[in-house]
Image (spheres, rainbow, N blue to C red):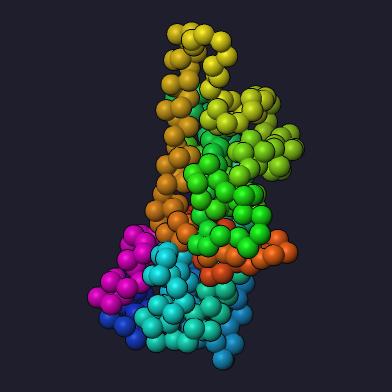
Amino acid sequence: MPLKTSKQELMEFLELLGCSEIFFFDNVQSALEVSVTMAFFEASRYIEDRTIAQSNHQEPLELQLAVALNQLGTYGNASSSENIATKFGLSHASVNNYTNRIIEGLLAISDDWIRWPNEDERRRISNEMFQNGLPKCVGFVDGSHAPFFKAPMEDKETYWSRKKEYSLQFQIICDPNRIIRHFYTGYPGSVHDAKVFAACDIAKNPNHFFSPGEYIIGDSAYPKSETVVVPYKRRQGQFTQTQRAFNKYISSHQIAVEHTIGLLKGRFQSLKQIRIQIDRNGHCQVLPGDKSVCCPAQHFNPQGPMD
C-alpha cells in the first residue's frame, strides 16, 4: 500500500519530538534533502509494521528514526554520538541504541526495497534501452569505496585502496532510472573491482538473473562475458574508429551508475567516513552509520516498496 505523508503529519511529528519546524530543518533535515527526509518518515511506519515491536519502555519510533537520520546523513564530528546526544537531549547510550535499532530494521526490510528486476521488469528496461541503441541492456555496474574513520588495527595494507585511504569496497548495479537493483560489499579496499564482481551471486549464477541475450554494462575494470559488456581495451596500437565510437557510446550510458553512487554518497554523508573498526582478530565492529542501510533507505518513496 502506498505510504503518504502530509504537511500536517510532519507537523504532528515535530510536535511529538518537541521541536520547532525551524529547529528540525536546521538540525535534522539538513543532512538530507526534503524529499528524502519526508520519505524516510514514511518508511518509519513500514519499519514499525514489519520489524520493530514497540514496547511501553521505548521512545517513539519517529524519534529513533530522526536520531538515525542524523548519523546516516552526516560524517566526522557531526555524526558522533556525543554531538547527536547533545542535539536531542539524549544519553550517549540512547543514541547508539536508537541508531542500531533503526539499522537493524532497515536491513531486515532491505529485500523489499533492493530487488533484482524480474523477467517482465527486465523486458521493460530492455525496451527502454533499445530506444537508446542498447537492446537487451538491463543495468549498469560499478564499484566504489567507503573510507574508514580510523585505520584497522592489523593488516592495514589489505584495506589500503588505490585512492590512498583505508576503506571497504562496495558494488552497485542500477537500472537506467538510477534505482539500485543489487548491492554487494565486504571486500577490503585493496581488492580489484573484477574480483568483487566475480564473488557476487550475479556473476556466479548469471542464468538466475538474466534471460538469453540480456546483459549489464561495466567499465574496463570488469571482465567481458555473455552478461557483462565493457569497453574495448587497448591492446596494440590505437583503437579503430568503430571501437572508439563504441566505447564513447556505452560510457555515456554507464555513467548512470556513477551518478547513482554519487547521489547515494551525497544523501548519506556517513559513506564519506564510515564508523567501523577492524579488530586484531579481523572482526568487523560496525559503529552507528552502517553503509548497507543507506541503499534501501535511498529508495523510500511515496509509492512504497517494489511489488
Position of 126 relative to 300 (above/below):
above
Left or right: where 231 falls relative to 212: left
Q: Residue at x 28, y 71 (%)?
A: 26
Position of 36 relative to 199 (above/below):
below
Q: Specify the segment rendered in magenta.
A: 21-40
Q: Residue at x 45, y 52 (%)?
A: 264
- Residue 46 position, x and y percent, is 54, 68
Residue 168 or residue 261, whichever sits in front: 168
Residue extending furthest toward the bottom: 56
- Residue 36 position, x and y percent, is 39, 60
Left or right: where 117 falls relative to 237: right
Left or right: where 58 falls relative to 252: right
Q: Residue at x 53, y 22 (%)?
A: 231
Q: Count the marks: how many?
A: 0
Residue 68 or residue 121, whichever sits in front: 68
Q: Main secondary structure of the magenta part?
A: helix
Q: Residue at x 52, y 74 (%)?
A: 99
Say if residue 54 shows up in the picture: yes
Q: Is residue 35 magenta?
A: yes
Q: Is residue 250 magenta?
A: no
Residue 185 or residue 18, whichever sits in front: 185
- Residue 291 position, x and y percent, is 54, 59
